[in-house]
Image (cartoon, coloured by chain):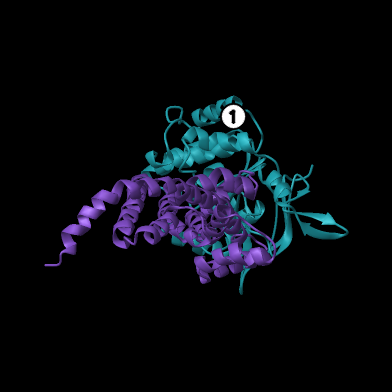
Chain colours: A purple, B cyan
Amino acid sequence: MPAAAPNFWVVFWAKLPYFLSVLLGAAGTTIKVMLGALAVALTLGLIVALLKLARLVPLRWIANVYIEVMRGTPALTQLFIIYFGLSDLGIDIPPVPAAIIGLGMNGAAYVAEIYRAGILAIHEGQVEAALSLGMTPINAMRFIILPQAIRLMLPPLCNYAVSLLKDTSLASVVAAPEIMFFARQLVTETLLSMDIYLVVAVLYLCMSIPMSRLVAYLERARRAWQ
Amino acid sequence: MDPLLRIVDLHKRFGETEVLCGIDLEVPRTQKVAIIGPSGSGKTTLLRCVNYLEKPTSGHVYIDGTLIGEKHKNGAYVHLSDRELAKERAEIGFVFQRFNLFPHLTALANVAIAPRRVLGLGLQEAEARAREMLTKVGLGHKFDAFPERLSGGQQQRVAIARVLAMQPKLMLFDEATSALDPELIGEVLRVIRQLAEEGRTMIMVTHEIQFATEVADRVIFMDGGRIVEEGPPDAVIRNPSQARTRAFLTRLSER
């Protein structure tokens, strides 16, 4: 039996408080990047969705190109372009804002499709009723369609938020001081890869499990509503 | 005096199919018109063209002398902007076959939302008007019910109250009772009859021949996208002059 086995847990428990103190401090940045990117994705995504549903063909085209480009290239590449690429052109964006912009712009493409699916799921008769009462298409969207569509969109939007939480780890490669960034520093410092990355995994789980519980709850609520 | 509604040489085409092949129609104020005819004859499309839910391929619709859905500009007809079109539609009430109530709003809010958001009334005033209209259609006890909790007949009555709250010049009924269970048809027809007696101008697409005979001043029989025959109910329904009208009425009575 290898002598290292009992040794692992001894070292693990001994070092755990130190790891936690460093990593928990970085969790704030992780959450900040996630919420920031979520806000960008939700706002920009709505604009892209409305463009995609627009009557004018060129507007729909812009939305299609945006969605194809964002979904067809790796988020990591997009982050590198925003952080390193723009820097070459003399535009220096600090790591955290760069991560928020990059992940948010990437997410907007997915969120736009969620919005669009939600809006299209509302029966045509609803728009017609609103228009026949004298509402403009914009007011019909605002007072009749969106309030109904949001209930359909919430579960997939929360799913997206969970995957966004995990994707914030990409921000470590543009030096945003979030959990994975400090984890890699700790590994360099102590060489205890397994210990540190296990702690990291548990930290992400602690954040994602409540979120996926929320998704499950919303799914049940949606079925009850329908 | 100008007729309230004037339709001039209206054509509507869906791809290769011509659904309306030149409709001319004038409806004076306070007249009740029933449109009957086999399915696919273009009755519903005609009704939908009146408030521009369907854009006519050619031809024009006037209400009170005002062009609907378009305007003259430099000697040509151009489509209205969303805002201008909405203003015109606010004066035309449309009752749908499938009610199309807003499921996220209570009965009261369904009726109050257009007075509030389209006419710009305050919440109190809009809800007072909504309560009045719901009471009028016999739903004074259902203000807070959501549509899913209402029967089909009640839902259709809410839909009628929703239209009444906008005080429209003209009311259009698109097979308002076709989606209802037989035992619920009566309550909706009673409300429509009451509105007719108030002297409102209305056009009803309907399969209820008996009801059309009693309520309408004028019956129009459509087939193949054309008006085949029209006149007072006694003439068109009891004593049709066209073979196609007779065939349709016979088929209907044999059901």
Hey, which quadrant is residue B146 in on the image? top left
**What residue did someone put label 1 on?**
B126
Q: Residue furthest left?
A: A1
Q: Is residue B50 left or right of residue A111?
A: right
User: Which element type, helix, strand or loop, lies under badge 1?
Assistant: helix
- x, y (%) of residue B138? 46, 30
Q: Residue furthest bottom?
A: B16
Mark 1 chain:
B
Observer able to see residue B83: yes
- Closer to us: B128 or B24: B128
- x, y (%) of residue A217? 33, 46
Which residue type does callout 1 highlight?
Ala
Look at the picture and state if A98 lies above or below B111.
below
- x, y (%) of residue B4? 72, 44
- Closer to us: A47 or B155: A47
Look at the picture and state if A54 lies above or below A150.
below
